[in-house]
Amino acid sequence: MMGAVFLTISIVGEVIATSFLRASQGFTQPLPTAVVVIGYGITFYFFSLALQTIPVGVAYAIWSGVGIVLVSIIAFLVYRQSLDAPALIGMGLILAGVLVINLFSQSAMH
């Protein structure tokens, strides 16, 4: 159970850090840069804790898949970046893959 909590914290940290990369303007803006550095520090620390109970391949698939979808949604809402039909379909397939892993895989978080 704690593995899932650690993985969730890791995903949230990654999404926040990645979302602030653009605002950091090449690491020239101090506050957004600090958010990026701290966010990635949190991300990798909690990801390493999650790996104590979750297989690395499963954890990485979930981490990257959920991260891609959440960052894309934030980019759409905050930066007004467009998502066309193929992008939406692809993200739907990524989410479907994460669901299949979590619902049906014997390797996931056991």
Image (cartoon, rainbow, N blue to C red):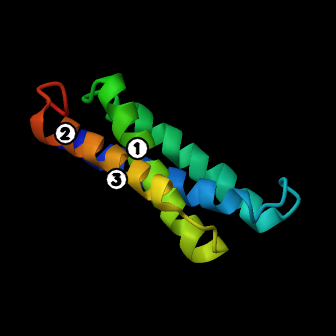
| Left or right: 77, with 67 as reference point | right
Q: Amino acid at mark 3?
A: Gly
Q: Assign the N terminus to one quadrant of the image.
A: top left
Q: Tell me which corner region of the image, top left, top right, bottom left or bottom right, holds residue 60.
A: top left
Q: Distance of mark 3 from mark 1, alpha carbons? A: 10 Å
Q: Which residue is identified by label 2?
A: 100
Q: Which residue is identified by label 1?
A: 65
Residue at x 30%, y 29% (from the top left corner): 58
Dot 2 alpha-carbon crowd within 10 angstroms: few under 14, some 14 to 19, many 20 or more: few
| Left or right: 11, with 25 as reference point | left
User: In what element is the residue under mark 3?
Assistant: helix
Q: Judge by depth and name the residue closer to the eye, 70 or 54.
A: 70
Q: Judge by depth and name the residue closer to the eye, 101 or 26.
A: 101
Report x, y in % for residue 2. Answer: 23, 43
Report x, y in % for residue 106. Answer: 11, 26
Q: Judge by depth and name the residue closer to the eye, 71 or 41.
A: 71
